[in-house]
Image (cartoon, helix red, strand yellow):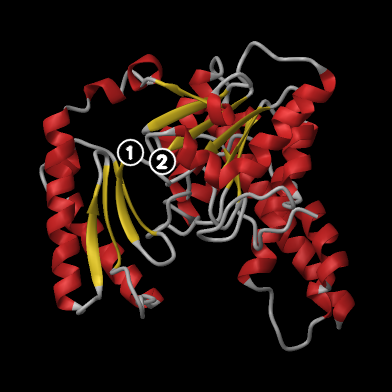
Amino acid sequence: MATTAHRRYAEIMHDVEELINDHIAQQKRGTQERSKLKLLVPSVGVFFTPLSLEEAFLFQDERRRISSRRFVPPSFNDIRLILNSAQLLSLIRNGPIELVTFDGDVTLYDDGESLTDQNPVIGKVIRLLQQGTRIGIVTAAGYTNASRYYERLHGLLDAIADAITDTGVVVDDPRLIILGGESNYLFEFDFHAQNFLRYVPRETWMLDEMREWLEEDIQSLLDVAEGALRECINNMQLSAEVLRKDRAVGIIPVAGPGRQKFTREQLEETVLVTQQVLEVSSPGKKIPFCAFNGGNDVFVDIGDKSWGVLSCQRYFGGIEGSKTLHVGDQFLSAGANDFKVCANDECAPPAYPDYS
């Protein structure tokens, strides 16, 4: 029984792999609308590389014994790990990877926590930097001063500084940047700067498309979003307060004893209501935005991570999507701020924040 299941699962993965290859071939001819995959899944987007799904399944089946299970079918996490393995295999074979971008919370570290010096990802990030790979941390955390990002990322920043001190080599060109507020605040690693981060003024790195976003439209969008958020607070009787920033607005639990932990359903309802209100609004048709569930808050940011990763690519000299990997945790199409990144580069959603 396990042998039959193993063979059938492998055949399915092979068939999907061939559908993707056909879609990529059609992309190159400019006729992707005619691909078999597009006909089966009209919402399918762009593929930057082939996916070795059959080989990835064989690798994960050896580890997870998917085909040996009698009562539990392949799960969401099984499929996610197979896709991740296929993506990594492809990137390695078509390498080198020139840029890796990371989400922060629930990807580099636990939700609301910091990247401490004990985190196993630090050594791997430093190894990427030593190999010449550029690193971008694209996070929803929107701070205007370097000290706040240092608080969240001090383990990594200190480790990079220590590595520079040990080798005595200070690289002049930037290798690591932080793009906060999804795509609004850019800080560059600087060994000589306080907190090892130097703020880069927005006007020096903004994409040409971003320069067309008028400030009055940005504030109008945030006004509409704030109204929708307040309506959700009233309708669901949430013990929440509104937090308004220059490029974002959101709701957070009221501070103090007995601070409320919002349910997932409350958070998702707030995201979807706010998103729908914005999509039909006048400023929402002019300004890109992202409404997302932050774990125990909901925020609306100007722009989204697709703009953030695209900014990283261009800041580092125009790195192609096929040479870029984004690692994040939120890839569902609703209420997830990593989902839109897939339009610009390859993505790897980790099932768990495990870098072993």
Looking at this view, is 145 or 57 the one in front?
Answer: 145
Q: Say few, some or many: other residues with alpha carbon within 10 Å of mark 2 (under 14 / 14 to 19 / 20 or more).
A: many
- Left/right of residue 162 with respect to residue 304 in the rendered view: right
Q: Give the position of the N terminus as an image quadrant.
A: bottom right
Provide the secondary structure element on which disc 2 rests: loop
Identify the residue position indicated by label 2 in the image: 182
**Contact (Cβ within 8 Å) of mark 2 with mark 1:** yes
State the image coordinates of residue 8 (x, y, percent, origin top left): 78, 69
Identify the residue position indicated by label 1 in the image: 303
Q: Quadrant of residue 210?
A: top left
Q: Earlier in the sequence, mark 2 or mark 1?
A: 2
- Left/right of residue 159 with respect to residue 59 in the rendered view: left
Measured in 3D between alpha carbons, the distance from the residue under mark 2 to the one under mark 1, in whole angstroms, is: 7 Å
Provide the secondary structure element on which disc 1 rests: loop
- Left/right of residue 299 with respect to residue 102 in the rendered view: left
Q: Amino acid at mark 2?
A: Glu
Q: Quadrant of residue 50?
A: top right
Q: Is residue 343 visible?
A: no
- Left/right of residue 329 with respect to residue 230 in the rendered view: right
State the image coordinates of residue 198 (x, y, percent, origin top left): 50, 23
